[in-house]
Amino acid sequence: MAEIGRDAIIHSMDKFLPSKKFLKWMGWAVGVVIVLFLIGNFIQGRREIFQSEFKKNNQDGRLDITLGEIVARDTDSDGLLDWEESLWKLDPKNPDSDGDGILDGKEAEILRQELNAGAEITGQEPTSNPTTTENFAKELLVTVVALQQSGNLTAENLQEITNSFEKEIKNSERPAMYDSSDLKIGEDNEGTVSGYVVGINKIMKKYPIKDEGVSAIIEKALAEDSAEDLNKIDPFIKKYQSMSKELLALVIPPAAITAHLQLTNSVYNLSDDFQSMKTVYDDPIRAFLAIIQHEKTLEELYFCSF
């Protein structure tokens, strides 16, 4: 009975699960757009800087700027490099960001001393629920200060920090939203299998897994500096949330428990990925995490093994 059910489920699912080639392309398209933004917004500190560099993209899609050039840039000549101004929440185009008569370079030196002394960074409101980006920035500040004081703050060391961070992200595991206790498991008989096949077909037709154009929405929002455009992602978040709920409502034959759980979690993760990608303006590191996780989600969908 289990083998009969398994064959029926395989035949049903193969018609609807997306191809590996499509999933890889979709993950790459979303990733390229947001990673380019993060280079400009987080490291250089201002979207307008990113936009000017973005226009210089060559045909290979690479920015016409090196990490060394980013590290060495001091637009307002205040003694503080542009990327450092972003970390200290200062303006790279204003030598005295807070208008207190102290150049940002000197002010940053005072802040470094306070940080080394274990004091809270002055001039910043405490956050009850710091974002992923704020947490990362705090850790990065400590690392940067240590490198500066030891005379080892170089483009190569910054690249090593970036590589280490990316490796840590890629090796991280997202906990599953659902487990077998959340499923409705039926009897091991033809009736359960038949009802499940009908139900899964209905859900897959109602919520086809496809390219939702999220990468284009993000690209447009960044190009036009319009965070409001990101709200166009909401219908797709809702779509996959609803799909995961309907998958949970199905009565599952015992032969399909593992695969159905994997499918349901992967579908929910699609909605979670898109929700995190929406935070590209407010929490860019969370958005970057979502890119890495999204690639895993797409692979999980492809390898759903009924």
Image: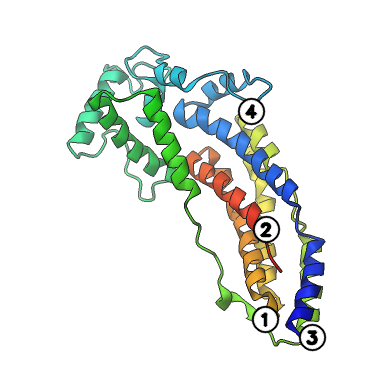
SS at badge 1: helix
Query: Going by the image, does 64 lie left or right of 193?
Result: left
Mark before the other along the chain sequence, 1 or 4: 4
Quadrant of the snapshot with the N terminus? bottom right
Query: Going by the image, does 191 lie left or right of 280?
Result: right
The residue that mark 2 highlights is: 301
Q: Amino acid at mark 1?
A: Pro
Q: Amino acid at mark 3?
A: Gly
The residue that mark 1 highlights is: 254
SS at badge 3: helix
Measured in 3D between alpha carbons, the distance from the residue under mark 2 to the one under mark 1, in whole angstroms, is 20 Å
Q: Residues within 10 Å of mark 4 (few under 14, many from 20)?
A: some
Residue at 63% x, 34% y: name it: 221
Q: Amino acid at mark 2?
A: Leu
The residue that mark 4 highlights is: 223
Numbered tag placed on residue 191 in the rendering = 3
Q: Amino acid at mark 4?
A: Ala
SS at badge 2: helix
